[in-house]
Structures are given as structure tokens and as C-alpha cells.
């Protein structure tokens, strides 16, 4: 495979990929069905708190470098990305409802729609904006051979990333202090992925979000 002008060797994972897709599709379909009522309540809270759409649909870079639109509940004022893609601690662009949604990662739940469409997986390297994928090293290009996911090793390591970025120039802080480590963890996932690792990541992500210890195997 060639990604962004560089040749990348793909791992052979035919049968496991089909099983992963079947699991993802089933889980996403059931999840969306069960979450219909909570989604309605969240949508009402978003509309009541600020003008603008219920969903945020920013462009992300997916497998093989293909762009797609990610689904999230909108947590910021409309067109917030014009002021930068990184979100710092107590960012003034975050709405009242958005602050609560972000705290418990509920804004990420609509990505089950992306999973249903085959653009994302439940577990996989978190998709980035082109600003960051365009500067991937030759080694980091391997990240783009996997279907991006709702959660991965870097999601657990940086479950409260906004707090780490602080309030002054969060985009610069992200690039200088955290981007390389997030990419290292994405690469680690791509190289060691398995069905059992996916299940472990899902459980540990839920544990971290609900206030449990931010713990993961293999991360510094």
C-alpha cells in the first residue's frame, strides 16, 4: 500500500479483520438502538444551551489517508475549529452542556454511526486532522493502515488531555509535548492489535471515564 507517497507494508489479517468488522457492526447497531432515548435528551440539552447543530461533523483522516466526517455531539460554539483544533482546559468555546458531555466522553457516542458505516471501529487508532497526519514520519504512516477507532491506547493514556494542554496555546502544547507520544501509542496498537486487546481497551476505557485509575498495559 502507498500512503501519502510512501510505501507501507500491510499486515495480513483477513479473517480477524472480518470478525472485527462483524463485532463492530453488531455492537454499533445494538448500541445505537439502546441509546435512542438518551441521544434525544442530549440533543435537547445541546439545542437548549446554544444555537447551532446537534452534531459536530469535522473532517478526519481515516484508513489509507482517506478523509471522512466524524460524528460527535457538538460541545463547542459553531465554527469553533477556526480558532484551532486543540481544546485546552476551560476553553471558552465549550458550551455548558458540552462541558458535561466532554467530562464523561458522551460526545463521542455518535461515532457509533461511523462504526456502522465502516469508517471507524470501536477500537483503533484515534483519527486525527490532516494538520497532524500530513507530518507523519515514514514509521507513523503505519497508523493509517488500520481503521481508526473510538478508543485506543492513547485514549486511555490521555483521557483528560484538555487539562494537560492548559489554557495558553493548547495547539502548540499538544504538538510539542503530546503528539509524538500519542503516535507512539497508536503504532503500538497497530503492531499488537488483537480481539482480546480490543476487549481490554474497551473495559479500561470505561473504567477510566467513570473515574477509575487511568491505567493501561504497555504505556509509559
Image (cartoon, rainbow, N blue to C red):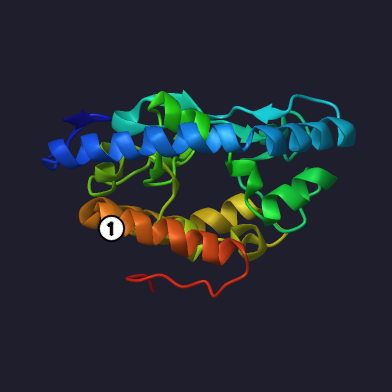
Q: Is residue 168 left or right of residue 206?
A: right
Instruction: Look at 55% across and 33% down and name the residue there.
Output: 32
Instruction: Evaluate whether residue 134 shows in this view.
Output: no
Q: From the image, tell me which residue sits under label 1.
A: 196
Instruction: Look at 54% across and 55% down and name the residue there.
Output: 174
Query: Toward which corner of the image does residue 145 lie, by quadrant?
Result: top left
Q: Where the N terminus falls, by quadrant?
A: top left
Residue 173 in the image, given as x and y percentages of width and height: 58, 58
Q: Is residue 146 left or right of residue 35?
A: left
Foreground pick, 168 / 32:
32
Query: Toward which corner of the image does residue 211 lie, by quadrant?
Result: bottom right
Residue 207 in the image, given as x and y percentages of width and height: 53, 66
Residue 153 in the image, given as x and y percentages of width and height: 40, 59
Q: In this view, does 127 lie above or below 69?
A: below
Foreground pick, 197 / 160:
197
Q: Could you say whether the residue bearing mark 1 is in a helix, strand or loop?
A: helix
Residue 188 in the image, given as x and y percentages of width and height: 28, 58
Instruction: Look at 37% across and 70% down and name the residue there.
Output: 219
Foreground pick, 67 / 135:
67
Instruction: Evaluate whether residue 91 shows in this view.
Output: yes
Which class describes the residues within 10 Å of circle 1: few (<14), some (14-19), or many (20+)? few
Q: Is residue 163 above or below residue 135?
A: below
Q: Is residue 95 above or below residue 50?
A: below
Q: In this view, does 99 lie to the left or right of 202?
A: right
Q: Where the C terminus falls, by quadrant?
A: bottom left
Instruction: Look at 65% across and 40% down and name the residue there.
Output: 84
Q: In this view, does 45 lie above or below 124?
A: above
Q: Is residue 208 left or right of residue 19?
A: right
Amino acid at each position: 500500500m502507498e500512503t501519502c507517497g510512501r510505501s507501507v507494508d500491510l499486515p495480513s489479517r483477513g479473517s480477524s479483520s472480518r470478525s472485527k468488522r462483524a463485532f463492530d457492526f453488531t455492537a454499533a447497531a445494538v448500541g445505537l438502538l439502546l441509546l435512542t432515548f438518551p441521544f434525544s435528551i442530549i440533543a435537547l440539552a445541546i439545542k437548549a444551551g446554544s444555537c447551532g447543530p446537534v452534531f459536530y461533523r469535522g473532517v478526519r483522516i481515516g484508513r489509507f489517508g482517506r478523509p471522512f466526517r466524524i460524528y460527535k455531539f457538538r460541545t463547542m460554539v459553531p465554527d469553533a475549529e477556526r480558532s484551532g483544533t486543540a481544546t485546552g482546559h476551560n476553553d471558552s468555546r465549550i458550551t455548558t452542556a458540552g462541558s458535561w458531555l466532554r467530562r464523561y466522553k458522551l460526545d463521542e457516542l455518535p461515532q457509533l454511526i461511523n462504526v456502522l458505516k465502516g469508517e471507524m471501529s470501536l477500537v483503533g487508532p484515534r483519527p486525527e486532522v490532516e494538520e497532524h497526519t500530513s507530518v507523519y514520519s515514514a514509521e507513523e504512516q503505519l497508523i493509517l493502515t488500520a481503521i481508526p477507532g473510538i478508543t485506543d491506547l492513547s485514549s486511555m493514556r490521555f483521557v483528560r488531555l484538555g487539562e494537560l494542554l492548559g489554557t495558553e496555546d493548547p495547539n502548540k502544547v499538544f504538538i510539542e509535548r503530546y503528539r509524538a507520544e500519542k503516535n507512539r501509542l497508536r503504532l503500538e496498537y497497530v503492531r499488537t492489535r488483537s480481539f482480546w486487546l480490543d476487549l481490554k481497551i474497551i473495559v479500561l476505557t470505561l473504567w477510566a471515564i467513570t473515574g477509575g485509575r487511568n491505567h493501561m498495559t504497555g504505556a509509559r
